[in-house]
């Protein structure tokens, strides 16, 4: 592949841009001030995820100019990612009502699905399933959920960054191993854009990602998974496996809070990773544990799923079983003792 040098340039550009954004946030007092629902204790600049957004979108334009990737994929990513990032940026600088945020998220998802031609057929236990318009509707909800769950899971230093980098690079390794090198570019560039930001976000974080960055990463990863499924249906299972930590924690927490009748769009700190970080007294062990789970548990299973194409769903169940145990073990969606009356 040509243009490999682009990856190091991407990381450097993101690193420098994050530095600029940090100085800007400090001058303008754009700070995340801790409260009773925060997982940090020191006022910290926020909005650094804009560096990821700008770097990645500029690179998408470059990929289109060089004709490295099909313009239809790039158009879907550019439009959806930009809209979500703008909504997140506005919410970072002032409050946007939840209903309007959600409407914007669905518009972004529908834009992406229009250019991707919706949800492709996929295989469960050897049977090809094409859900038609029902599948396209489910795909829209999937993208919106990926967007929001990533926002929910961006609550401790380095976690959202490590998840994106390990998932993207893990899938790049799978693409190369199974002969789909043409799919490597976008996840690899996204990983490098996040890596530059992680230099500043690694525990203890010097700047936070903010909604603009986390929402952008969520919908982008969702789009990349659907894009890959059009090239090879088995890739959707591999992506879902690689993102398993975030999917299990966020979904289990959401369901449990819904059953208690709580307002799920309000800030809280009842995810498993938040309970775990308080148990350990710091963020780093949890962030590194997620990295190890992704590399040593989820990535091998994703490889096996692609090697034995008929066991995608089975592989997903096997991958998720211990993750669900961990969410239960760390009381995901539970009520903090200090809040119990």
Image (cartoon, grey):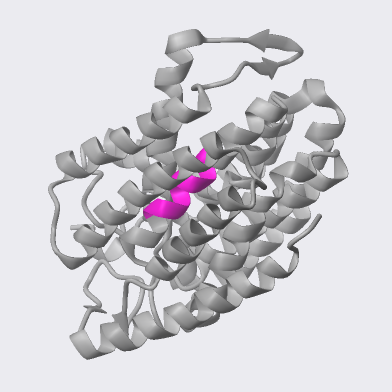
**Magenta segment main secondary structure:** helix
Residue 284, horizontal then vertical, whole percent: 55, 76
Q: Residue 217 in magenta?
A: yes
Residue 323 visible, this angle? yes
User: Residue placed at 58% from the left, 10% from the top?
Assistant: 130
In this image, 95 relative to 238: left or right?
left
Q: Position of residue 37 (x, y in %)?
A: 26, 66
Image quadrant holding the C terminus, namely: bottom left
Number of dots carrying numbers: 0
- Give the magenta part as a residue range: 215-223
Q: Nearer the viewer, residue 314 or 133?
A: 133
5 sits to left or right of 215: right
Seen at 32% across and 75% down, the residue is 46
- In the rendered view, does 249 fall on the left or right side of 94? right
Classify residue 21 by image quadrant.
Answer: bottom left
Q: Where is 41 relative to 75, above or below?
A: below
Q: Is residue 129 above or below residue 101?
A: above
Which corner quadrant of the image does residue 71 belong to? top right
- At a point 58% along the width and 64% down the height, the residue shown is 162
Taking the image as shown, residue 278 lies to the left or right of residue 258, namely: right
Residue 331 seen in this snapshot: no
Q: Quick one: 27 or 5, which is closer to the camera?
A: 5
The N terminus, quarter of image: bottom right
Percent coordinates x, y for residue 119 in the rendering: 53, 22
Residue at 43% x, 71% y is 278
Q: Position of residue 198 (x, y in %)?
A: 54, 74
Instruction: Using the rendered view, name the quadrant where residue 80 is placed.
Output: top left
> In this view of the protein, which residue sits in the foreground, 181 or 232?
181
Residue 303 magenta-highlighted: no
């Amino acid at each position: 592949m040509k243009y490999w040098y682009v990856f190091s340039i991407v990381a450097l550009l993101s690193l420098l841009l994050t530095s600029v954004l940090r100085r800007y946030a400090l001058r303008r007092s754009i700070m995340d001030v801790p409260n009773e629902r925060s997982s940090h204790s020191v006022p910290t600049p926020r909005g650094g995820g804009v560096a990821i957004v700008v770097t990645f979108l500029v690179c998408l334009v470059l990929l289109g100019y060089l004709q490295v990737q099909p313009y239809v994929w790039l158009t879907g990513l550019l439009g959806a990612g930009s809209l979500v990032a703008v909504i997140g940026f506005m919410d970072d600088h002032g409050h946007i009502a939840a209903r309007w945020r959600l409407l914007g998220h669905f518009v972004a998802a529908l834009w992406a699905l229009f250019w991707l031609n919706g949800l492709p057929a996929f295989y469960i236990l050897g049977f090809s399933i094409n859900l038609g318009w029902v599948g396209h509707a489910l795909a829209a909800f999937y993208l919106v959920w990926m967007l929001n769950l990533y926002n929910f899971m961006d609550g401790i230093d380095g976690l959202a960054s490590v998840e994106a980098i390990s998932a993207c690079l893990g899938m790049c390794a799978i693409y190369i191993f199974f002969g789909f090198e043409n799919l490597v570019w976008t996840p690899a560039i996204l990983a490098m854009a996040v890596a530059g930001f992680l230099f500043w976000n690694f525990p203890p974080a010097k700047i936070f990602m903010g909604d603009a960055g986390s929402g952008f990463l969520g919908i982008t990863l969702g789009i990349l998974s659907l894009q890959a499924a059009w090239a090879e249906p088995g890739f959707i299972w591999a992506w879902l496996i690689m993102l398993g930590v975030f999917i299990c924690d966020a979904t289990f927490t959401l369901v449990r809070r819904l059953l208690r009748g709580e307002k799920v769009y309000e800030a809280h700190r009842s995810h498993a990773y938040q309970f775990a970080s308080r148990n350990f007294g710091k963020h780093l062990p949890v962030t590194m544990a997620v990295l190890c789970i992704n590399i040593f548990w989820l990535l091998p299973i994703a490889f096996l799923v692609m090697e034995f194409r008929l066991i995608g769903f089975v592989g997903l169940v096997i991958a998720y079983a211990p993750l669900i145990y961990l969410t239960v073990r760390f009381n995901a969606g539970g009520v903090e003792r200090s809040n119990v009356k």
